Image (cartoon, rainbow, N blue to C red):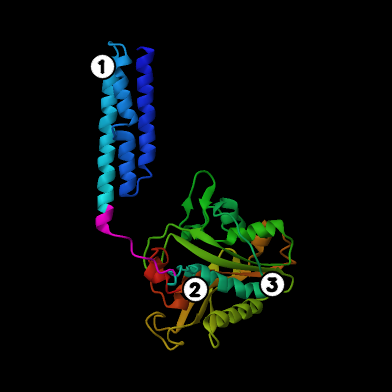
Amino acid sequence: MTTEAQEVLQQAEALRAAADKAAAGVDDASGLQAWRVEFLGRKSALNALSKGLGSVPEADRPAAGKALNDLRAKLEATYQELERRLHAAAEAGPAPPRDVTLPGAPAAVGTLHPITQTYYEIAAFFTQLGFAVAHGPEVEDDFHNFSALNFPPEHPSRDTQDTLYLAGDWLLRTHTSPVQIRVMLEQEPPLRVIVPGRCARADAVDASHYPVFHQVEGLLVDEAVSLADLKGTLAAFAEYLFGAGTKIRFIPDYFPFTEPSADLSISCVMCGGEGCGPCGGTGWLEIAGAGMVHPNVFRNVGYDAEKWVGYAFGMGIERIAMLKYGIDDIRLFYENNFDFLKQF
């Protein structure tokens, strides 16, 4: 292609770019008219290029002429589109004025999840008594989750945990007790600590069971600790969380890591201990497990079991929240139902 033809094509491309840029600024009838005169009028650059085709060698003239015809068709289509937009805007009329004095829409403010709120209430009580807060991994090994807590290998007590095992020696922790082991391995007694966190077990989902749940466990180790200290602490906790006059009772139970062990029940918050459907007519509701730390646990972490004694307790946060707020289905905590959650 000759130099003359190439120059025509370059000028046509530059003209197309200039027309597109100018079209973006057309917002009224006078602007549209000015655009049409500049790019499609008798004295437009496009007409000047068309008149100059005679200087292009005859062999290249068809290609150069086609390029200019395509450009003209494109500019005419742009003009029609601009005209259509202006016409549509004129029919729609002016935008309604804005009253800048009106108050703005208030921003929605969220709240903490009821499980988080309940944990903060529990933690507030025990931290006032000098308990520190400790956290640990949700993926644990057998030693911290079982062996160190006096769960011997192949012992039937492991079957009650419904453990979700991973590859090798790893598993999803079935309780937050492994963090108690980690704390004792790192710190010398005396100590006081609560351990909140998420746990997992292979439970079938129903109104009272879910494969993911949250616990708060507590541990106190010192030289002069008795079951009376444990009972007094939990009695004060029950009144703090459920109101003055709430009673507690211990029922003997078995946990590998405590001896003696007990289930902690409170007087029914629904009927005041008179007996109702939620408490099965007994007037009592179980909320936690507790007991004196088994000497084997102390030996497993290197503590002198002849010198140190302690107590431990654990409770499900969902269970506490259900009793506190009168919730009858644990699944409500995990369905992300806004109508449910906004009550808190």
Give the distance between the C-alpha atoms of the residues marked 2 and 3, in whole angstroms.
22 Å
Checking the image for residue 320, the label placed there is 2
Q: Position of residue 196 (x, y in %)?
A: 57, 64
Place of residue 144 in the rendered image (x, y in percent of width and height, measured from the top left): 60, 54
The amino acid sitting under disc 3 is: Gly
Badge nearest the viewer, 1 or 3: 1
Q: Is residue 26 above or below residue 195?
A: above
Identify residue type, mark 2: Ile
The kind of secondary structure element at disc 1 is: helix
Look at 74% across and 71% down and name the residue there.
Answer: 223
Residue 329 in percent (x, y) is at 38, 70
Numbered label tally: 3
Residue 95, magenta (yes or no): yes
Q: Nearer the viewer, residue 46 or 340?
A: 46
Marking on residue 130: 3
Label 2: element kind: helix
Separation of residues labelled 1 and 3 (CA atoms): 94 Å
* Residue matched to label 1: 62
Q: Which residues are magenta?
A: 89-100
Q: Nearer the viewer, residue 246 or 128?
A: 128
Residue 279 location, quadrant: bottom left
Q: Earlier in the sequence, mark 1 or mark 3?
A: 1
